[in-house]
Image: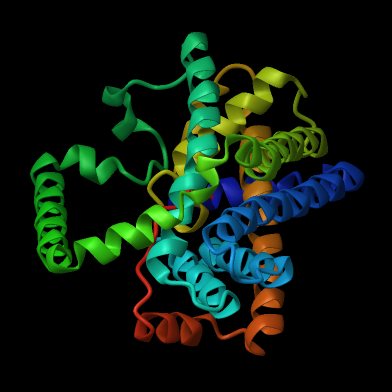
């Protein structure tokens, strides 16, 4: 926490030197990125429910609301709200099918993330596992420093998984039907490439362009290599969302990856500045989406309503 506060102080120290135009362009690209991802998700849902009308605006609202809540609440609480709102928007839909659509979405995202991660490995800039606990602000150091505790957490997760499997066993046929329905778009490869992959490629192009403009705004060298390295650190930071936005882990990886290449004060200002800006944008956009969808911005109440509705939390790559 101390290191994160130091980084925030470095950000405010460099605030006067931040270029406004590239900062606004970065925010614009980020908002377009959200639109692209929501469009891809909507098209997966359309294929899963061809008999239903699935308008884009409520799906866009559901997606943005989820992103906004994830920006301020750890452990992916926004994903629950996202499913809840999508379920309200698509008549006859089930939470199982809607959650399973994210497996379809993860195919392209995972492949592209692996390509970027593989590129970073070829540069030899990522820290080894033995160095992770020593990284300043690393969120997961406790798990590595306390292997018995980590083993206990893993054991509880396995027990919970077995309990879920036992509970699902008598419902397996119904579950399989609902789960497989989400993959309908994959049975039409041309449609999948045109209506899902194309939008996800737009999403990735815009997220890299967002980083490009943020680098410019904070006076850091704009290069494809730097953009890809920032993207890798962001992906690693949000892999297991312990803190909102994974800010501590992202900062730790950035400092290590750019060590000796960029002044640490400038790097910390960039890291925290980008995270604060995106968190604020996501939170504001999410609140607006909630307001338009449910006439409320009380996300805790919405989370409680979603829990009472029996929403299961999906796995997400956002």
Q: Residue at x 64, y 50 (%)?
A: 40
| Residue 232 shows in this picture | yes
Q: Write the residue at 67% across / 73% down.
A: 58
Q: Is residue 183 above or below residue 120?
A: below
- Say which of 104 and 282 sits in front: 104
Across and down, in percent, residue 240 comes to 38, 48
Instruction: Please tell me in which quadrant of the rendered image residue 286 appears.
Output: bottom right
Toward the viewer: 53 or 293? 53
Above or below: residue 88 compared with residue 57: below
Rendering coords of residue 306 (x, y %): 43, 80
Task: Tell me which residue sits at (60%, 77%) in the image.
Answer: 89
Is residue 74 visible in the rendered image? The answer is no
In the image, residue 116 sits, relative to residue 148, either above or below, namely above
State the image coordinates of residue 172 (x, y, percent, origin top left).
20, 61
Q: Is residue 290 left or right of residue 214?
A: left
Query: Extreme right residue here?
Result: 21
Towards the viewer: 218 or 39? 39
């Amino acid at each position: 926490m101390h290191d994160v506060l130091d980084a925030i102080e470095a950000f405010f120290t460099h605030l006067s030197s931040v270029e406004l135009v590239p900062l606004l362009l970065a925010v614009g690209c980020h908002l377009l990125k959200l639109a692209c991802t929501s469009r891809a998700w909507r098209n997966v849902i359309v294929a899963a429910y061809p008999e239903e009308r699935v308008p884009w605006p409520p799906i866009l609202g559901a997606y943005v609301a989820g992103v906004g809540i994830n920006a301020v609440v750890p452990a992916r609480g926004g994903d629950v709200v996202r499913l809840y709102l999508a379920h309200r928007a698509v008549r006859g839909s089930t939470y199982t099918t809607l959650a399973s659509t994210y497996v379809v979405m993860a195919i392209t995202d995972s492949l592209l993330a692996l390509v970027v991660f593989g590129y970073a490995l070829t540069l030899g800039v990522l820290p080894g596992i033995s160095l992770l606990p020593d990284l300043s602000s690393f969120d997961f150091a406790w798990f590595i420093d306390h292997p018995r505790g980590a083993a206990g957490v893993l054991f509880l997760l396995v027990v919970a998984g077995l309990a879920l499997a036992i509970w699902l066993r008598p419902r397996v046929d119904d579950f399989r039907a609902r789960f497989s329905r989400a993959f309908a778009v994959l049975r039409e490869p041309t449609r999948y490439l045109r209506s899902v992959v194309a939008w996800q490629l737009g999403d990735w192009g815009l997220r890299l362009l967002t980083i490009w403009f943020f680098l410019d705004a904070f006076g850091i060298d704009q290069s494809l290599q730097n953009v890809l390295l920032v993207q890798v650190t962001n992906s690693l930071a949000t892999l297991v969302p312990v803190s909102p936005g994974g800010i501590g882990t992202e900062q730790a990886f950035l400092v290590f990856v750019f060590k000796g290449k960029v002044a640490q004060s400038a790097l910390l200002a960039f890291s925290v500045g980008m995270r604060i800006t995106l968190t604020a944008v996501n939170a504001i956009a999410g609140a607006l989406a909630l307001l338009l969808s449910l006439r409320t911005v009380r996300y805790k109440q919405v989370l409680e309503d979603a829990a009472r509705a029996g929403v299961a939390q999906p796995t997400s790559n956002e």
